[in-house]
Structures are given as C-alpha cells and as structure tokens.
Amino acid sequence: MAHLRRATRARRRTAAPRQHLSRKISSADAPAAGAALDASAQLQELGDDATQDRSNKMEDDLGPTTQIMTLPFGTPPKVLLVDDDELVVANLKELVAAAGFEVDTASGGVAALASLQQNFSPIVILDLKMPDMDGLALCRAIREGNWPGYVYMVLLTIRNAEEDILAGLAAGADDYMSKKTSFAQLLARLRTGQRILALEHSLKEALAEKRRLTMTDALTGAPNRRYFQRRLTRELERIFRFGGELCLLSLDIDRFKTINDRYGHASGDSVLREFVRRIGQCLPRNSDWCARMGGEEFVVVLEETTLGGAEKVAERLREAIASAPVRTRAGLINVTVSIGVSGLESATDRSQITVESLLSLADTCLYASKEGGRNRVTLPHANALPRMGRSAVG
Ligand code: GH3
Ligand code: MG
Ligand code: MG
C-alpha cells in the first residue's frame, strides 16, 4: 500500500512519475486503493443495513437524534492543506481535489490563519512540524479564533508517538494521522470530518428554528412582543446614530370579546389569523412590519415614514379590515379595528424617545379612537412626546 511520505520521498529521489500516487488519484478509484478494500466494502454493506434498521426505529421515536440519522451531506466542504514541505502539499492537493474537495494551501501557520480569515475552510489538514508556527500552536490558535463555523482539524505528521497523539488532540485536533497513512484512509477520514460538519450544520439549523419560534406567535404566525421589543430597540439605536424617521401604529380589534362570545373561540381565532393576513397584504414594503402584542392587540412599525404617511397606511389598514367580513365556520363576521399613531416627529427631543414612550403615545391615541366610537384612526399632537395623557392627542 502506498503512503504519502514514501511517495514524496520517491518523487524527490527520482524524476520518475509518481507511481504510487497516480494509481489512487481519482475519487472513484480511491476506495479501491488497498487490498483490504473488499472487506471494507462488505463492512460498508453491513453498515448500511445497520443504519437502515436504526433509522426505521427512529421514525417511531421522535427523539432529538432523528435528524442526525437523516443528515444531508451536500457538496464537500473546502479543505486547507498546511505544510512547509511543498511536495507533500502538492501530492495531497492532487489527491484531495480528485476526491471532489475544493482545496486551498498554506506553507505555514501564519499563512494558514490568514487564509482562513480571507476564505474560510471548514477542514484543515496540518503538519505537526513547521518552522514559523508548529501544528500544535496552529491548532490552539484556530480553536481560540472566531470562525463562521466549526473547523475540523486533522494533524498530519511523520511521528506517531503516543505523546504526539495526545498533545495533538489536547491542542484541539479532531484527528491525527501519520504521513504513512494510506490515501484511502485519509479520504475516509475526510468523510468523517464531512459528517461532523454536516452534524454541526443541522444543529445550527435546529437552533435557528428554535430561535425563530421564540419570536413568533403560534396562532397567527406574526412576530411576537419579544421580537417587537428587540427589533424596535435596534431600529431606534440606528436612527439615533444615523438619523431617520419612524412611526408606530397601535391596533386593537373592536369588541372582540363579543365576537368570541357570539361565534365561539375558534371563530375568534380565525378572525385573528385573517386580521394578520390582511395587515400583511397592506404592508408591501420590507421595512414595514407587524407584531402581535397579545390578545387582539397588534402593532405596526413603519420605518422611514412620517406621520402624514403613517396616517395613510393606518387608514388603509382600517379600511382593509372593515371593508369585507371575515369568513369563518360560524359564518361571516364583521370586524373593525381602532388605531392609534405615534412617531418620532412627535418628539421635542428625540434622544428621550424609548420603545415604551412611542408605544405609550400610540396607546393613548388608540384609547381616543375607542372613545371616539371605534373603527377610526387617531394621530397625536405635534410635540406630544415626551408629554403624555389626553393632551397628547390631536
Ligand atoms: P374593545 O373594543 O374595547 O377593544 O373591546 P374588546 O372586546 O375587543 O376588548 P377586551 O379587552 O374586553 O376583550 C379582548 C378579548 O380578546 C378577550 C379575550 O378573550 C380575547 N382574546 C385574547 N386572546 C385571544 C385569542 O388568542 N383567541 C381568541 N379567540 N380570543 C382571544
Ligand atoms: Mg384589547
Ligand atoms: Mg379590543
């Protein structure tokens, strides 16, 4: 069986073609490189059966490991080869590229860190002995760094002593290979790295989905109060720094309790879902968004919008709700909404504005809409913020 180190030496000694390497370059060929491959193919088949068995069991058991069994592999990740020995790098590059991986190279630790920063590679194969920064130091530097994702590191060396292996793994390497390791084994180990990266990807996706759910109202699919608080806080910070306009609408469905009492809670839920759908239809700009604050209370945030524009949008929303009854299993239900408006323009001193003061002014105007007979829009006085209460309402 040909070994990387031996192949490299042979290449140095003579200008003869790389006999050992060339036989194993193609990715399709690679598994056929060793005599042990027949046995390995049988093992693979057994493995497939075992995997099949397990995944069948997993279908009944909706435990958190189900996704691990169904990981997609996708395109192979990029591999960064780090070695000061040009011939080793050249041989490895040819082999790893032929196996379908995109390959970057670096001649030392410093160059490797720069390469990762400029063009990230999730798999790094690195030499233990290098002049500028040895492999152990590079492993530690990579583990201490901030990267777009996990870096799967394989330490490659001529030494195979127990203490080297332990030091490599302690420095943060995931795997450790002698340069005498066969090419077939190197590729098999890269596939292991690929599997670990796919697992990391799937965990990240699951976390992102969990985070999305904590920001979403389950009934209507609209963003919830937590999302509102975070996004508006961030948006106000941006405006205080760079300038801009923003308006807030506070919406409350009229006599919603009566709708529940008359048509049932399920119909009330249908009204809430249809309400959110219609609001969404009236907000074509990406910078305008809606959140459910709780019950039948919603807010709409209009970024880069003045009070004049907000009044128009609020009227459009009111009209979209009142103009057609909502179809539910219990029949057609007439729904109206009352709206209060507030905006940065209402402030005498913008630096005093908070999420709470904007919301509070919009609620004061909403209250005026309710008092005025419902199904209407109320705007605040000029300079209503930070003044509050009835005198703020226009
Ligand atoms: P007003 O015009 O003054 O706003 O009167 P209202 O009846 O809409 O206001 P009130 O606050 O008295 O009632 C709100 C109702 O909203 C009471 C509550 O049961 C109902 N509600 C809150 N959340 C949900 C929900 O998720 N689904 C349904 N179906 N009803 C809800
Ligand atoms: Mg209410
Ligand atoms: Mg209400």
Image (cartoon, rainbow, N blue to C red):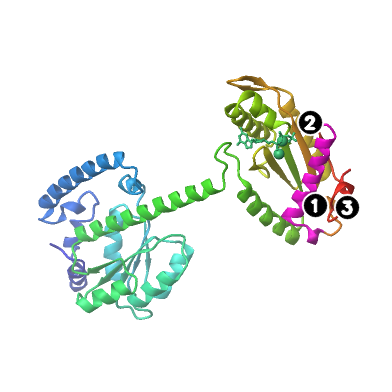
In the image, 381 versus 311, the foreground residue is 381
Give the residue drawn at x 57%, y 42%.
217
Given the current orientation, which residue lies at the most extreme front position?
261
Which region of the structure is painted magenta?
350-373
Labels 3 and 2: the sequence-earlier one: 2
Tag count: 3
Say which element carries label 1.
helix
Give the residue drawn at x 80%, y 49%.
361
Q: Is residue 171 above or below residue 23?
A: below
For badge 2, the amino acid type reads Asn
Given the current orientation, which residue lies at the most extreme top position?
331
For badge 1, the amino acid type reads Leu
The quadrant of the image that shows the C terminus is top right
Residue marked by disc 2: 375
In reply to whether residue 51 is colored magenta, the answer given is: no
Respond yes or no on whether mark 2 lies under 8 Å from ligand 1. no
- Residue 126 drawn at (x, y percent): 32, 70
Q: Nearer the viewer, mark 3 or mark 2?
A: 2
Side of 232 where 376 appears, left or right: right
Q: Nearer the viewer, mark 2 or mark 1?
A: 2
Residue marked by disc 1: 344
In reply to whether residue 353 is colored magenta, the answer given is: yes
Residue marked by disc 3: 383
- Residue 8 drawn at (x, y percent): 21, 69
Crowding near pointer 2: few (<14 within 10 Å), some, many (20+)?
Answer: many
